[in-house]
Amino acid sequence: MIIPAVNELAEHVSVTKACELMGRSRATHYRDRAAKTLGPAKPRQSPGCRLTEAERDEVLTRLTSDEFVDKSVGQAWTILLDQGVYLCSMSTMYRILREHNSAGERRKQATHPPKSIPELQANRPGQAWCWDITKIRGPRRGSWFDLYVIIDIFSRYIVGWRLEHHEDSAMAKELIEQAIGAHELPDVVHADRGTSMTSKPVAQLLVDLGITRSHSRPRVSNDNPHIESHFKTMKYAPAFPGYFESIEAAREFFQLFFEYYNNEHRHSGIAMHTPASVHYGTWTTIQAQRQATLDAAYEAHPDRFCGRRPLPPQMPKVAWINPPTKDALITAA
């Protein structure tokens, strides 16, 4: 519809002005007009240098023979050339193989089964731990310290930590031993797939103690959410410096920070209780005190609560790493 309108207008003004007034690209207008004038494109003629069907069959037979089936086109072409045989160019060989769906990888490839999704639950403190190592900036460019942290999944309590100049599996083993000596033996220890986490010293320690090992899937940070969330809370804290002048200064800071985190930080994931309160079971008394305070406020001014008795945040009964889906629960039932 727009081409006749542009042509009609072009009888009074230039084609350029007509296209501009009609909001049409001049190049598009000329291209469409030429297509209508010339008609459909003629089929492309086969080039005279094209291989005959017999020659193409010979190329395909050679490339799929036992001698060349496991070799690349480049190797097959070169070997044939060394034997005094020239069939066609390498690009033609690729073209013939593509036509027969044989141009892909023909060698046997190693396949790895998909990693299972870790599904952990903790119904009480001390049942499941998770740990990780994060980098802490040092005094100079390229200078880093390694902070090891172990956290209880249910209570979010820091059961062990250490700061070192480098990452080492022996240090990780010592930290886990110290944490186990100071707290109850956990049923499960979860970590990602870092070198220290999957190292033989750590694995052997957990096996000897009868502790179940659990690991995240490769490159899936959501499989270790509690420790990742803790690292963000730590590094985004107002008191956290951009870097530390020395490892001694860093250790002093983290000693104070973890004491604050365990004993004063109200955690949203555990009904705004402190990790120490949940870890050692004093949260029930504090929860009752909160409810009593809210009850007194309700009795004094019920109109301020729209007739609903207020409740403090409720403590979750279970902490999860990848809770099972509804389909999985239905299947299990």
Image (cartoon, rainbow, N blue to C red):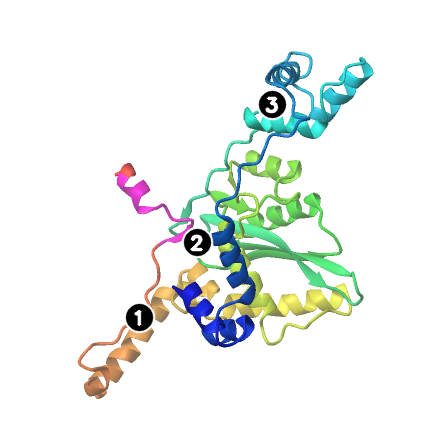
319 magenta-colored: yes
For residue 125, which numbered disc appears in the image?
2
Camera-nearest label, 3 or 2? 3
Q: Which of marks 3 and 2 is nearer the N terminus?
A: 3
Q: Which residue lies furthest to the front in this view?
A: 11
- Element at label 1: helix
In this figure, which residue is indicated by the disc labeled 3?
A: 108
Q: Give the residue type at disc 3.
A: Lys
For this rendering, which residue is in front, 286 or 134? 134
Work out whether 290 lies above or below 188.
below
Q: Residue furthest left?
A: 307
Work out whether 284 lies above or below 13.
above
Q: Give the residue type at disc 2.
A: Pro
Q: How far apart are marks 3 and 2 (CA)?
A: 49 Å
For this rendering, which residue is in front, 69 or 39? 39
Magenta region, residue range: 318-330
- Element at label 3: loop
Q: Distance between the residues labelled 2 and 1?
A: 20 Å
- Residue 277's spot in the image, x, y percent? 44, 65
In this figure, which residue is indicated by the disc labeled 1?
A: 288
Looking at the image, can residue 105 be seen? Answer: no
Badge 3 vs badge 2, beta-carbon distance below 8 Å = no
Q: Distance between the residues labelled 3 and 1?
A: 65 Å
Q: Earlier in the sequence, mark 2 or mark 1?
A: 2
- Element at label 2: loop
Residue 285 horizontal side relative to residue 307, left or right: right
Q: Quadrant of the C terminus?
A: top left
225 magenta-colored: no
